[in-house]
Image (cartoon, coloured by chain):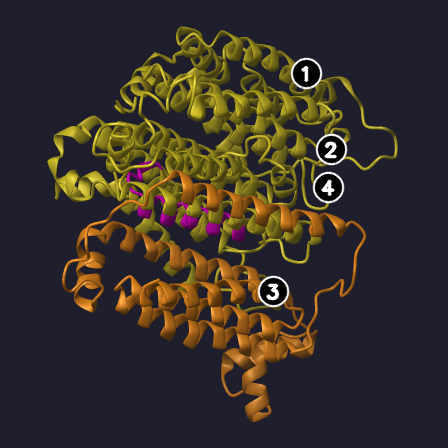
Chain colours: A orange, B yellow
Amino acid sequence: MTPGGYFFGVCAVVAVLGALATISARNPIRGAMGLLATIVGIAGMYVQLSAQFLAAIQLIVYAGAVVVLFVFVIMLLGPDAHGADGGKRPGSWARWIAAPLVSVLLLGGAVLLARVSTPQRFRAAPPGHGTIEAVGGDVFGRALVPFELSTALLIVAAVGAIAIARSRATKPSERPASVGATRRLFGGAIHPRDARTVDDEVAR
Amino acid sequence: MNLLFGLSPFLAVGVGALLLMLAEAFGKPNVAPGVETTDAGAGRAGELALGAAVILVIGAVLSVAVWVAGPESLPELTQVAPHLVIDKFTLFFSFTLCVGGALAALLAGGYLPEHGIDRSEFFPLLLLSTVGAMALSAAGDLLTLFVALETMSLGVYSLIGLRRGSPRAAEAALKYFLLGSFAAAIMLFGLALLYGATGHTDLAGIGAAVRSIGSPGSTVSAGKILISLVLVLVGLAFKVSAVPFHQWTPDAYEGAPTPAATYMAVAVKSAAFAVLLRVLLVGFGDERLASWGAGWPPALAVLAVLSMTVANLVAGRQESVKRMLAYSSIAHAGYALVGVVAAMRSPEAVSAVAFYLLAYTVSTAGAFGALILCGSRGAEAVSYEDLAGVGKRHPAAALAFSLFLFSLAGLPPTAGFFGKLYVFRTAIDSGLYTLAILGLVNSVIGAYYYLRVMVYLYMREPAPGAPRAVTMRSGFVATALVAAAIFVLLLGMAPGFTLDMASGAALTAR
């Protein structure tokens, strides 16, 4: 086995173990740390594919920012936050059967694939492949359309997240909003417009 | 300039979505005095719905304009190929998607204020999701395909969850989101495998690599291609909600606000069919893969038969009209899949599917719209009992509902009749007699539950003391219904023009 093979093996084991920890950990912090391990493992594979820029971005953005954000959210909720069920539910036997079944099927598929097929020979990466210049040239040249389309993806994700996360913004209030600020500051109306509203309120 | 013109349907909807967001953010909320709001779009659902509908109609008109100018006469369009392939197929589908989106926006203009879902984000999300759907129908490259698919899906996931505080809406949104992400992951796995096996991300290159299998010097492995084909089919079958990948559909439609369900039923399904056709015919159009003996046609035929039969049998037993319409949309996916199977032999089948989806879009949007019209705040029409006696209390709503149900059932002189006729005829021409006969039998079964709605509309009276649905009044819903009815009758009585356009939309795959 070449050193590259060992490197790939270590990265793959780290990534898969991290993924398993992410979905199986009961403690959400451990889940986030599992995700971190997966991300680092995949970044290692990117390096081996001579995609250094992508590897760096993967570490900076995902490991550095996204996982930290996850940890923040988990800490805000409390690290002991559990799911609503907490324990065993009736019908959970399906999970015990389904997960190993799917895993075995996938593993069988992978082994079968490795046996029946020779790997596709890609051209050797040209010099400069994976550098910022090469990635930038691809993003703003050859792959401009998908790149521009991903702006729509990001906008729709942001708007959708806000729409879902925000609770109802419009609710009946006890008093008119226009009065509040001036009254709190000056103890009364200082502008005719406010005076009118205050009078209305008094009349009511 | 020509490039901008060729891309104008996409740009109009995309830029329109951004302008609508600005108009929403900087507008003044239109709320009663004494109501506190931080939402600049509060109370302006009507204006925003009108804006969204106008933008989508502009998109549809521009699609027609580019069609008339002829995409082949715009050589600049090759600059965006293969990421976006602007051909007549794409333009036909972008017209369908814009029409479906515009109808859903108009329905939302009446539905959202009536039911107190004062969420102005609905309209930008709808428009951006339509941009994704249009790009999906134009995608000739795996990169665009996946980004467009996610743009469309993310918009729809959030549209479903807009009704905050309703556990059913939360369940619907979460179910669709989790299953949809899972399906997208499966499909992405397939796409990655496809790239690994062929070394291409553009569908044409993949098609060429697939054709080279077996020829001397080819390193493309058939095993990987087959596995990736299965994975991609699973992902797309989920999006078109074909049995057995349909379990999310009734729950998601029932929990979603009805205009969002309309949008899912028409636009998401049409876009998914467009990309399904393009992937199968361009990427997997090899004679060996697209034959009855091996490859995708037998798999899709099984999906088609299962979708038609299971959905029709289950739909007849539903008590909720919304769930019935959800199962009906699954059954219609089955009919359209018959056309996709026939596309392995005749290019005409592609036009049949395109025409079918346009007919299905206007009929389904109309049926959901009529259901919206039959209910009002606190008395939303959901079950069959709610519709009892509407024929007497509100003849116009009942008449519109009946017209769209006729079309869904495939009775002349409506759009649905010609859609079904065209699809089954191409199936017979391609020698798929069993599929065509099964489709006809299923159409008859389907007529049962569509007619059952009409029995309740016209021949039942609400039980004394039972809560009755009160019909709502809304210019937006009425406009949408009239527009959909014109389309249904036009496509049903004078289909020639649209059929010609559809036959121009045939994919030149092989």
CB-based contact (under 8 Å), mark 4 and mark 3: no
Residue occupying image coordinates x 53% and y 65%:
A17
Marks 1, 4 in one chain: yes
Indicate which disc, 2 or 1, sits on the residue closer to the N terminus.
2
* Distance from Cα at disc 1 to Cα at disc 4: 26 Å
Q: Which residue is mark 1?
A: B448
Q: Amino acid at mark 1?
A: Tyr
Q: Which residue is mark 4?
A: B379
Specify the quadrant of the image occupied by residue B2: top left
Q: Residues within 10 Å of mark 3 (few under 14, many from 20)?
A: few
* Distance from Cα at disc 3 to Cα at disc 2: 29 Å
Q: Amino acid at mark 4?
A: Ala
Q: Amino acid at mark 2?
A: Ser
Marks 3, 2 in one chain: no
Task: Kindly identify which numbered label has been placed on residue A167.
Answer: 3
Q: Quadrant of the C terminus of chain B?
A: top left
SS category of the residue bearing label 2 = loop
- Whether B10 is drawn above or below B500: the answer is below
Task: Kindly identify which numbered label has been placed on residue B383.
Answer: 2
Indicate which disc, 1 or 4, sits on the residue closer to the N terminus.
4
Residues in magenta, as a range: B137-158
Pinpoint the chain carrying mark 1: B
Q: Is residue A105 magenta?
A: no
Give the percent coordinates (x, y) of residue B1.
12, 44
